[in-house]
Image (cartoon, helix red, strand yellow):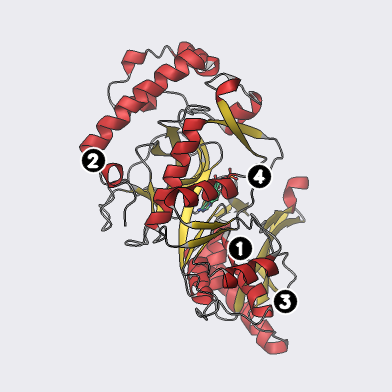
Amino acid sequence: MIYDPAYETMPRAELEKLQLERLKDLIALCRNRVPFYANKFKEIGFQTGDLKTAADLSLLPFTEKDDLRNNYPHGLSAVPQEDIVRFHASSGTTGKITVVGYTANDLKVWAHLMARSLTATGLSRSDVINVAYGYGLFTGGLGAHYGAELLGAAVVPCSSGSSVRQIRLMSDLRVTGLCCTPTYALYLSEVAKKEGLDFRDKSRLPLKVGVFGAEPWSDSMCQTIEETMAINAMNIYGLSEIMGPAVSIECLESRVGLHIFEDHFLPEIIDPNTGQILGPGQEGELVLTTLTKEGTPLLRYRTRDITSLIEEPCPCGRTHRRMSRLRGRSDDMLIIKGINVYPSQIETLILDTDGFSPNYQIIVDRDNNLDTLEVCVEAAEPLYGDAAAGLTRVLSRKIKDNLTVEAKVTIIPDNTVPRGQGKTQRVFDKRQKI
Ligand code: DLL
């Protein structure tokens, strides 16, 4: 099903025309209302007339997370305070806050895009959806909530936490859709087991679709969740600076990549080191321009997220291009003895090895000036002696063969890895303290 066929299946030529018109309006808005951008345009001598095609976007400067931080809290706002109806904020790993203000129309567009997203995952007004993303400054909870309501589904606004109660409600209210982080979904399935329930038993827990995002998760993690819970585990992407969830969504028909809602967001992929624009299929950093945002419009925002664009038509009929599952963030990439390693690559190897659970931590340290990598992982079933040693050897060998780095693999006791309710920290890079 497609929620908004007129826009989601718009022929590419028409869509590109619409994008150009919206881009021109955006540039006028930035010039007239956001001194930060007006100054940047002046510095580089950019005139509004310079933009003739969407490709001329490359004439414009990038916006970085630091620009939002340095202009905290309202510096990049394009509207007077009385037109803002809600703020969201994200703290990120460095702890410095960025704030984004939304107008009433921004919230309307967001709910609409979330309703589009839920529809793409197979949910409809007849579903009961548990929103277990955190409600608050984080965009996950309220973002999913208003989209689900607009769709006409029945929302159970559990937020994250009180997991036993959530399981009970999911069973009693016959919840069919679940919005949360992938790690929280796994945790809910563990809690259900302890309560004597199993998500595979649809007569007790009829869940059919998970709408998961907000943190990196690999194809293997997706498969593990789908098997453990007997659901479709669909990938949703977004970020607070641009809007929140529903910047892009996986569709049921292809299950490869996430459609970016291109009538509202213009994507580019760049080389994170040189800033050069890369072609379809080439992996690099995603850069997004908001085409319709009023409160905090952003030009060429560097997301730091690593992905590639898929241009091939999709069997679902949507004409909006897809982005591949995120490999990670450029600032999450570990350099171990000079070798680039993404945590998601290690996750894939763990989950592709029979005997391990999806609960793991990656610890990077330095010993005698040499980088060390340790992968601590819980076994699927308790393991001792030779069986444990054998399994650790298998994983170390896989890591060495695939990623060319040496890793010490340690099997840790069940329940050692803290179970997150929101985004879960998997990587501990102790070298940064040196
Ligand atoms: O995480 C918004 C969101 C909420 C997205 C609920 C999806 C679902 P932030 O807290 O600002 O916003 O974090 C944004 O999270 O730049 C990515 O690095 C990461 N991220 C978000 N979705 C995915 C995903 C929300 N599907 C940052 N896969 C982004 C991998 C994701 N990483």
Determine which residue is flagged by label 2.
Answer: 12
Give the mark, 3 or 1, whose residue is nearer the N terminus. Answer: 1
Q: Position of residue 401 (x, y in %)?
A: 52, 69
Task: Inspect the image, locate mark 4, and give the three-letter code of the amino acid beneath it.
Answer: Gly
Residue 298 pos. (x, y %):
49, 29
286 lies left or right of 319: right
Q: Amino acid at mark 3?
A: Asp
**Disc 4: which residue:** 136
Disc 4 vs disc 2: which is toward the camera? 4
Q: Which residue is mark 1?
A: 183
Helix, strand or loop for disc 3: loop
Q: For the residue carrying disc 1, how many other residues have a C-alpha within 10 Å: few (<14), some (14-19), or many (20+)?
A: many
Mark 4 or mark 3, which is nearer the start of the sequence?
Answer: 4
Residue at the image point whose x is 23% and y is 40% from the top: 12
* Separation of marks 3 and 2 at Cα, in angstroms: 51 Å
Residue at image mark 3: 414
Taking the image as shown, residue 219 lies to the left or right of residue 167, namely left
Please name whichever residue, 190 or 384, is drawn nearer the observer in this view of the structure.
190
Circle on res. 211: none
